[in-house]
Image (tube, rainbow, N blue to C red):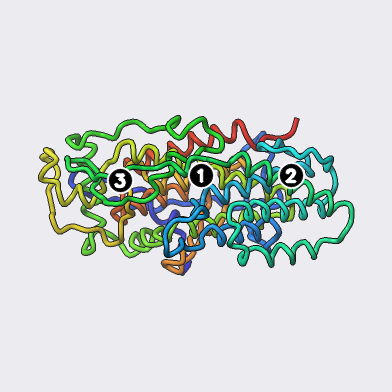
Amino acid sequence: MNVNPTSQVRPVVLSMAAALALAACGGGSSDTPAAAFGFDTSGAEKHILITPGESNVISKWNEIAVQTAAVASSPGGATPEERVAGPDVTTMQLAVYDAVIAIAGTHKPYAIKPTTAVAGAGEDAMKAAAVEAAYRVLKGLFPSRGSVYEAAYTSDMSAIADGDAKALGRQAGLEVASGMLALRANDGRETALPPYVPGTLPGQFRGTNPVNRIAPYIKPFTTHSHSQFRVAEPYSIQSEAYAGDFIEVKAIAGPTSTSRTALQTEIARFHTEPPGSFWARNLRQFATASSNIADNARVLAMLWTAQSDAGGACFESKYFYNFWRPTSAIQLAGTDDNALTLADPAWLPFVATPNHPEYPAAHGCASASAMEALRSFYGSKNLEFDFTSTVTGSTHHFRQTEDVLEEVRNARVWGGMHFRTSTEVGVEQAKNVTAWMTQRYFRPAD
């Protein structure tokens, strides 16, 4: 199934009577291939068609890193290697970026500049630097998971012609990886957290043993702290705005809803693939759309860093406010002291809700951070590309970065996981975090 949801649906506009208005909207055409990249933004933003290419050294080691970090936890419990995948893959991507960019010389390093003189050493040097940096970071973080990366390291190094360029690249990669591992040591994930106590008052999150509580304590990559971009307090559950969001979710997201269309159901399900696999796979294509090693290293470093810092900020806000999910809100509406909301003790969304507080929406944070990073990298919001989902087996086509945000906001409401305001706040929070990053990091060399 191949759908273009953003050309068929608009965001839901809901009255207090829960009337759903859907309208068609058109899209622009693409006229610039990905190789052109649209870096010149002196005039109108270009339309850029992203055409994924073959796997390369940058995209391959991103996939290896994701596979390495995603290895299931040991049956006996946590070990020193039980990691948080997002920040670990980000650490590897930043090491690859710093190692490659030291040779390319086009942009400023993130943090580590090798002492070895490697500038201008060439493409073989960049390949060797990327492989060495990726391998050494993964080996440092996951020493007992070599079955995932050792063979690839041997094969990829053997494929690079021996010589000074290869030797220089390996030295740069090793030096950067060592520096990056030292920089990220003791990053806060070892923080001992007290048992989580679910709320009992109206508006408070009711889940037990919620996930990703450690995220607010992991050191960010670019911001001062995850609380730096903490969102404003959520609206009162006695407010009309809350009631409007409540009525929208209740009407459209239940398993027997007659107001939800087949397309809306598909869109909601499309975005229920676990974020770790969904984003890693779909964003990897942007590192295959060019043959330029330095560009590929930079785009993945930007994407993973933006999502890591936006995700940390998002979960810091989530656990600071501990706002309840629509399921609890609808089932317990008799306690919210809002005359506009009606309880349904048996109500459940038609798809499962993640076990962490509602506000702000993490999917809003993930999507907006990625789209803003892409917009910065390409110099245009008019990117045309496809995303896939293993849940629906379908492909969604987007004509602009904002189309992704529109679809994700709708998906989380139509699936019953979030109130619309939360999705909008998550998007804005991530845009702010990513703007902070792009103004300070991954800048052109002087």
User: Mark 2 falls on what kind of element?
Assistant: helix
Q: Marks 3 and 2, Cα distance to the nearest angstrom? A: 40 Å
Q: Earlier in the sequence, mark 3 or mark 2?
A: 2
State which mark lies toward you, 1 or 2. Answer: 2
Camera sees residue 40: yes
Instruction: Please name the residue that numbered disc 3 is placed on.
Output: 195
Q: Say if mark 3 contacts mark 2, CB within 8 Å.
A: no
Quadrant hosting residue 420: top left
State which mark lies toward you, 3 or 1. Answer: 3
Quadrant hosting residue 374: top right
Query: Which amino acid type is shown beneath numbered disc 3?
Result: Pro
Query: Which amino acid type is shown beneath numbered disc 1?
Result: Ser
Instruction: Please name the residue that numbered disc 2 is placed on.
Output: 175
Is 236 rendered above or below residue 83? above
User: Mark 1 falls on what kind of element?
Assistant: helix
Q: Earlier in the sequence, mark 1 or mark 2?
A: 2
Which residue is drawn at the image coordinates 25% and 44% (left, top)?
197
Q: On the rendered structure, is 81 left or right of 250? A: right
Q: Marks 3 and 1, Cα distance to the nearest angstrom? A: 24 Å
Q: Earlier in the sequence, mark 3 or mark 1?
A: 3
Residue 11 horizontal/vertical position (percent): 36, 48
Instruction: Please name the residue that numbered disc 1 is placed on.
Output: 308
Q: On the rendered structure, is 132 left or right of 306? A: right
Please tell me which residue lies in front, 392 or 360: 360
